[in-house]
Image: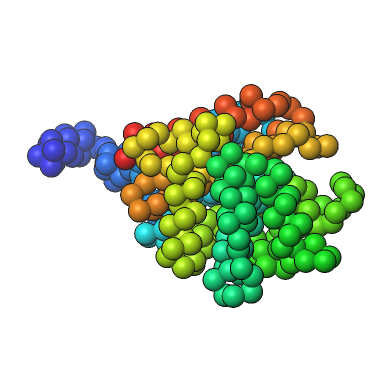
Amino acid sequence: MRRAWAAALVLLTACGTTPSTPVEAPAVQSAEACPYPESGFDCDFQRRFDQARRYAADRPGATALVVRDRERDVVWRNEHAGDMVWTASTIKLAMAADLLVRHRSGEIELTAGDRADMDAMLFDSDDKAATDLWMRYSGDDHRLFNAHFPGLGLVTLRPQPGYGRVFPYWGFQKCTADDLDRLLAHVLGGLAAEDRAYLVDRMRTVAPNQQWGVWAAGPGARPGAKNGWAEEDTGWVMNSIGFVGPAERYTVVILNDLRGEGGYDEGRETTSEVARLLFAGRF
């Protein structure tokens, strides 16, 4: 390669032409192949991020995305990661984490019935189980969970008034994808080992109606998920949060706020395809 360039230089100089400084091909290819060089992720992930972002941008509504590499402590997020979105049932993971923290500190004593309700709301997103736990442990003014949620990472979460006789209520809250990214980081890195292991196991063994979104990363990724979906007055939301990879190395948040442009089927397809683009075949 060097001899060929030198020969061309001699020829061009002899013809009275001075070539511009050449740009090496590998550098050009690297810049094109790595669309987010400042992200801290390798080029393969960067290309996956770009594919997922482009795909989501063409789908109904708006989709917020956050991916974290817990081992390298780097995060990639798209332009909607700071949007306030209905949490739907993803907040049940925060409820379970808070109850475990309170039990371990001695503030409360979880009964066998409480544990069964926790299992149910994580396994198949049982709403009655979540409501029973909320009414039992949210305090006389129903604000106790919300008072604790910022300590789990949900620093911008806001309960939404005007939707029922109970306020705040788990079923009517909004937060950002960044909030849920912090929640996952806390669950996997901030809880006691036994509590972490319990939640990881529950998220890995969810019911078939929960096996979409992050689940589409594929069995090789050993995913765990807490999904949530609801038809709100602003339209459907289809949300999926969880982890993939060895030792739950990567966490992912996918919040599809359809904004009246589609429903359950479109949202489930969007969140699942995003997860597939991000992780399928990676592990």
Q: Nearer the viewer, residue 101 or 31?
A: 101
Query: Based on the displayed image, in which of its 4 quarters is residue 14 positioned?
Result: top left
Q: Left or right of 104: which side holds 146?
A: right
Reply above or below: 56 against 242.
above
Q: Position of residue 212 (x, y in %)?
A: 53, 33
Q: Position of residue 75 (x, y in %)?
A: 48, 55
According to the image, what is the colour scheme of the structure?
Answer: rainbow
On screen, residue 26 versus residue 66, left or right, reads left
Please identify the residue farthest to the bottom as the structure is shown. Answer: 106
Picture quadrant where residue 239 is located: top right
- Please count the marks in the image: 0
Q: Is residue 14 visible?
A: no
Question: Which residue is painted at 62% across and 41% down in the image?
Answer: 125
Q: Residue at x 57, y 60 (%)?
A: 97
**Residue 103 visible in rendering:** yes
- Residue reaching furthest to the left: 3
Q: Quadrant of the N terminus?
A: top left
State the residue at coordinates (37%, 46%): 245
The structure residue drawn at horizontal position 43% and vertical position 36%, both measured from the top left corner, is 217
- Viewer-proximal residue, 58 or 177? 177
